[in-house]
């Protein structure tokens, strides 16, 4: 014997062989370690005294986003009209705020209303687009983030809501839940049953002009636990879980053209409340057999559960529903067969433009950015443009559906 007391090894951090390990302690240690590493990673990417900003756009990129010729932007600049762009290496660069100011200038002189500001007009309703899928890994959050950012860059007033407790959409826009939101300030505060706050109180401006964010965090799981108690307690109108998000949005809907909601990858009370508030539904689909089988089960559950919600008075009307094929590899034969299978069944409900699988999109995510944020020089020109064209085409098709819902 070495004279060491029986439990001293455990007190020093060494496992006690006589004691079975506890999963909660192991998971807790791993979570603490991971949180420390993530904080260090974020501090390296974005130092505490740094403010995250959107990259600027070259005059050529700005002209393309605005729908004008680069020569016209140059003439505006020479005439002293519009914002003063920064100059880098002899080239003009525009911020998203510059783009927004240019849109206002161009719209004021446009013959056709909505040419440069394509958002709502008098009598148009706010479009609430819910992005859903039952299975993780379908590109749901990536789709929601790129859609919200592109709509804002195109001149829409956009609100992005992170309804997923994993809060990946929040992280993409600079909010690390366990570090930045430990005391609330999320969508949960606006939809909770006890003493909810106005949604306006938890809306945060993003670093992209025209795009605001309502972040989420793990606290959203409380809604899944609170709702059964509210229903069992006969809480009246407060117990109607499917009205919570729609009611919260009603106070701010006049401030936005489009609301993009990133739903959790499950069919719980949060998702059903989001679907009840929606005017449009976007289902992301990875074209693999297991994913499509999972989607089949998801659609069956959606139909059954929302039918019950409709019978209870929920509004299940919508402007459009579409399936968006994501992480698509055109050279993959089985994927092509699956896409053809879906088009044969669902027809026009499948968007014409899929989002391609691309290292550019995944690599941008490593630094918590979208493809619209990263500097294109980080990738080969062909890789970047292939991914960007894919995203732009899909987002343009969705924008067309939004315009169609407004009768244009």
Image (cartoon, helix red, strand yellow):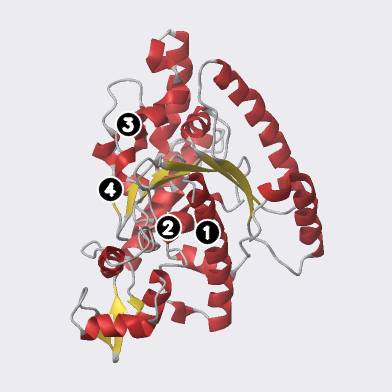
Q: Quadrant of residue 18?
A: top right
Q: Which numbered tag is attached to residue 204? A: 4
Residue 326 image offset from top left, x and y in percent: 63, 57
Measure how far apart labels 4 and 2 are at the Cα level.
Answer: 17 Å
Q: Which residue is mark 2?
A: 151
Residue that appears at 70% across and 31% down = 300
Q: Is residue 128 left or right of residue 199?
A: right
Q: Which numbered tag is attached to residue 190? A: 3
Measure how far apart labels 3 and 1 are at the Cα level.
Answer: 29 Å
Which label lies toward us, 3 or 2?
2
The answer to whether the residue labelled 3 contacts the one labelled 1, judged by CB atoms less than 8 Å apart, is: no
Q: Nearer the viewer, residue 210 or 263?
A: 210
Residue 146 image offset from top left, x and y in percent: 47, 58
Q: Nearer the viewer, residue 392 or 174?
A: 392
Q: Which of marks 2 and 1 precedes in the sequence?
A: 2
The answer to whether the residue labelled 1 contacts the one labelled 2, judged by CB atoms less than 8 Å apart, is: yes
Q: Is residue 373 left or right of residue 209?
A: right
Q: Which residue is mark 1?
A: 395
The answer to whether the residue labelled 1 contacts the one labelled 4, judged by CB atoms less than 8 Å apart, is: no
Q: Is residue 166 visible?
A: no
């Amino acid at each position: 014997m070495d004279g060491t007391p029986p439990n001293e090894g455990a007190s020093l951090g060494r496992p006690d062989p006589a004691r079975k390990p506890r999963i909660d302690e192991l998971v807790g240690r791993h979570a603490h370690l991971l949180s420390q590493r993530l904080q260090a990673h974020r501090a390296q990417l974005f130092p505490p005294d740094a403010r995250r900003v959107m990259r600027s756009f070259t005059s050529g990129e700005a002209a393309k986003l605005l729908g004008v010729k680069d020569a016209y932007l140059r003439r505006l600049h020479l005439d002293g009209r519009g914002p003063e762009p920064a100059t880098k290496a002899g080239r003009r660069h525009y911020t998203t705020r510059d783009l927004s100011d240019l849109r206002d200038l161009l719209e004021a002189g446009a013959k056709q209303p909505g040419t440069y500001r394509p958002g709502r007009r008098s009598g148009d309703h706010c479009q609430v687009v819910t992005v859903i899928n039952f299975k993780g890994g379908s590109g749901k959050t990536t789709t929601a983030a790129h859609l919200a950012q592109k709509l804002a860059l195109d001149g829409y007033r956009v609100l992005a809501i992170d309804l997923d407790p994993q809060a990946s959409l929040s992280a993409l826009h600079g909010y690390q839940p366990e570090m930045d939101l430990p005391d609330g300030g999320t969508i949960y505060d606006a939809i909770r049953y006890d003493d909810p706050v106005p949604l306006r109180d938890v809306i945060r401006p993003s670093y992209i002009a025209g795009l605001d964010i309502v972040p989420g965090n793990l606290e959203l799981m409380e809604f899944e636990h609170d709702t059964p108690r509210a229903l069992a307690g006969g809480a009246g109108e407060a117990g109607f879980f499917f009205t919570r998000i729609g009611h919260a949005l009603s106070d701010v809907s006049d401030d936005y053209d489009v609301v993009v909601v990133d739903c959790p990858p499950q069919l719980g009370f949060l998702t059903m409340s989001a679907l009840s508030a929606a005017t449009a539904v976007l289902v992301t689909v990875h074209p693999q057999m297991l994913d499509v089988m999972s989607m089949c089960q998801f659609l069956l559950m959606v139909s059954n559960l929302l039918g019950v919600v409709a019978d209870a008075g929920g509004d299940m009307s919508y402007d459009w529903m579409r399936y968006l094929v994501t992480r698509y590899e055109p050279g993959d034969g089985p994927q092509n067969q699956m896409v053809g299978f879906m088009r044969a069944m669902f027809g026009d409900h499948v968007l014409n433009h899929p989002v391609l699988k691309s290292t550019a999109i995944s690599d941008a995510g490593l630094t918590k950015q979208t493809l619209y944020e990263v500097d294109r020089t980080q990738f080969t020109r062909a890789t970047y443009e292939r991914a960007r064209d894919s995203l732009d085409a899909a987002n343009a098709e969705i924008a067309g559906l939004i315009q169609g819902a407004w009768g244009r």
